[in-house]
Amino acid sequence: MRGPGITPAVKPELAPIAADFERWKRTNVRPQKQEGYSTVTLTIPLGDFTGQQMRVLADLADVYGDGLVRVTQEQDLLFRWVRSQDVEELYRRLAAVGLALPDAGTIADVTSCPGAESCKLAVTQSRGLGDLLGNFLRSRPDLVAAAPDLQIKISGCPNGCSLHHIAGIGFQGGMRKVGTQAVPHYFVMVGGVVNEGGASFARMPPRSQLAAFPRPSSV
């Protein structure tokens, strides 16, 4: 089996439309406490971007931010101290290097550990599942709008490097026997949350409840 690899496909948008900017602004831009400034989140699927993109980001951080780029727990990147009047101009430059994806912090912003693609502890290729779910959800803005704050996190083993145990929907990689052969599979966990009151761990639904869900026709 092969995972999605570590070199993402870059899809530049040299003439982004206004509707795309507005969608991106709703999910990726937040006002700072300091009037006139915003924080801008860059959605980075699986946390992967190229060396060329990294060089552009360094220049953009100097020009539009405070010269620093922060990494979030969701594998995204964060610019601070962006002047609010410069947000649209920054968006156009991000779009030109394929870094203007929307839906930061939403259910489409899937977090995944490296998985068996590169980790010797993992038993499932969690990056492959993360890539599949992220692409599907970004293609379905109606689903993102229905549960925008729900988070999906995927770990390739019980160690939980993606923090799947405190996600609304968590996937934990494991093994099970099918006949005489051990095959990788996922435990599904639901209900994890982190807020000002603390953290609540997700739980595995009873198998009887999972069996009640219809099986997708494409599986």
Image: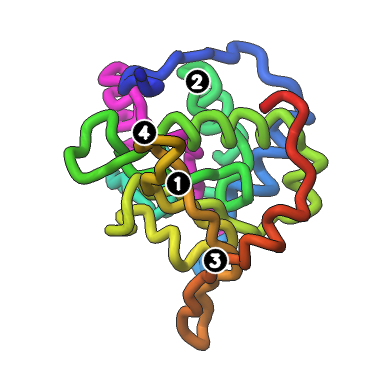
Foreground mark, 2 or 1, reads 1
Amino acid at circle 1: Thr
The quadrant of the image that shows the C terminus is top right
**Gap between marks 2 and 1 measured at Cα:** 19 Å
| Residue at image point 44% right, 48% down | 154
Residue under the image location 79 percent in, 44 percent down? 214
Label of residue 98 in the image: 2
Residue 123's spot in the image, x, y percent? 30, 41
Residues in magenta, as a range? 36-63
Q: How many marks?
A: 4
Residue at screen point 61% across, 66% down: 205
What separation in Å lies between label 3 and label 4 (alpha carbons)? Answer: 24 Å
Amino acid residing under circle 3? Met
Q: Counting residues from the N terminus, which is met first, the one under dot 3 or under dot 1? A: 1
Q: Position of residue 207 (x, y in %)?
A: 62, 61
Q: CA distance from mark 3 to mark 1?
A: 19 Å
Q: Earlier in the sequence, mark 2 or mark 1?
A: 2
